[in-house]
Amino acid sequence: MNLDTAHLISLFEHATEGIILTNGKGEITIINPAAEEMFMYNASEVIGKPVNLLIPERFHPHHSGYLNEFYRNPQNRVMGSGRSLYGVRSDGVEIPVEVSLSFYKKENELFVTAFIVDITHRKNIEQNMLQQQAELERMTNDMRKLNTQLEAKVEERTLILKEALQKLEQSQKELHDALDKEIQLSEIKSRFVSIASHEFRTPLSTVLSSASLLSKYTTTEEQSKRERHVEKIKNAVRNLNDILDDFLSLGKLEEGKVETHPVEFNIEEFMEEVLEEMKPLEKAGQQMVFTPEGNPVIISDKRLLKNIIINLLANAIKFSDENTTITIHYKIYPSHFEISITDKGIGICEEDQKQLFSSFFRGRNAVNIQGTGLGLHIIKRYADLLKGNIKIKSALGKGTTVTVSIPVTEQIQ
């Protein structure tokens, strides 16, 4: 088992959402551990069984209609818009869920993947909000009664009730914020499902088709054909690895697990190592030129800086043509140092530049180029950790310059 296969298996086995794959007959073919735990079944108990096993019986007639409609017109989507969805555990207990669907075809058979989230916690929050609202109404009525019955103590009672109402309103605000955050997280997960299913499909199809064709080239004269397909497989695997790295980096950032560890190092020696690593990604005739200016010894987080530069260089290579030069310029100032990376690639329109650091954003002239839309978002987060900033200067068809400024005199924590 290679590293990329292990990554894919790890994503499936350790996903916090339930994942269930059904075949063209609506039968369960694969279920991950999170879904087993959610529905309290072992895989052996559900494999080969209709997916209706996990749906309350009262919904079976409607679900059959929805299932038939999906098979007639399959498309990636979130189920349950405008209505509540429920699953049923092996012990008969119903649980509220959210379900996102994606699909693919293999040998003319349609397979449907369901990504399932148990939203019991969110439903409890909503119930708490209703209870808090009822409490607010009750206390408001009490205030009216007290004002009528205890005119002599209006000020005192009003003050007490105002304080209670402030606390209650604060509590409601916290509940609203918690619910909004969970909804936003759910939307991000849905976008992740859609993007991941699309981005993984292309390189995996390349690997499968090239691996199949390799077995047909058995003679020495066909060595060049074999090498061409081996290179296709390598490129596809690199794409998969880049996608996984982006998702894993974003996950660590969201969980607050990325820390800075500044050390002293020589930027010229550092860049020699980085450029050597990037050589296998260069297109035919491309060159990367490093021009340092000033004292090469700096103090910064070497690992985070390397991630920033590698991501920017990968973008410059990807969005530039063959036989072009990519320039990396370093300059030291009393308070900070700057690294600028300039390419002569496709450039970025002014309107897209405003959203470049948003997660999952792709420029309109880059939608047909491999990528997750997370690279610049992750770079910006890394620069923020280093208390630095990023500036982009670009024009369509004329190339792009990205300048990263990092402080050198301020202590990084």
Image (tube, helix red, strand yellow):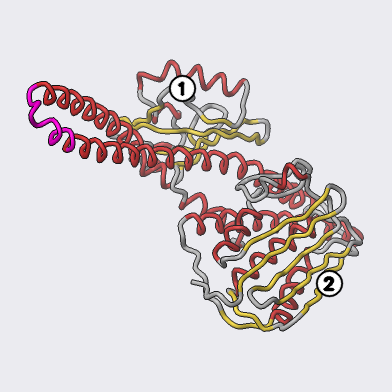
Height in image: 377 above or below 108?
below
Question: Quick check: 51 above or below 309?
Answer: above
User: Front-most of 186 and 110?
Assistant: 186
> At numbered mark 1, what does the secondary structure look like: helix, strand or loop?
loop
On screen, 129 above or below 375? Answer: above
Amino acid residing under circle 2: Val
> Residue drawn at (60%, 83%), measured in percent from left and top?
264
User: Which SS class for mark 2?
Assistant: strand
The answer to whether residue 154 is magenta is: yes
- The image shows residue 162, relative to residue 283, as above or below, that is above
- Picture quadrant of residue 156: top left
Report the disc number at residue 309: none
For the record, the magenta segment spans 149-159
| Residue 347: image location, x then y, percent | 81, 50
Given this view, does label 2 or label 1 mark the residue nearer the observer? 2
Q: Amino acid at mark 1?
A: Gly
Q: Residue at x 55, y 74 (%)?
A: 410
Badge 1: residue crowd in 10 Å (few <14, some 14–19, many ≥20): few
Q: Position of residue 297 (x, y in %)?
A: 67, 83
Q: Which quadrant would the N terminus be assigned to in this image?
A: bottom right
Residue at the spot of label 2:
289
Label located before the other in sequence (2 or 1): 1
- Percent of width and height locating residue 146: 11, 26
Looking at the image, which is closer to me, 388 or 366?
388
Residue bearing mark 1: 82
Q: Main secondary structure of the magenta part?
A: helix
Quick one: 351 or 154, which is closer to the camera?
Answer: 154
Where residue 21 appears, x then y in whole percent? 52, 37
Q: Residues within 10 Å of mark 2 (few under 14, many from 20)?
A: few
Cα–Cα span, label 2 and label 1: 56 Å
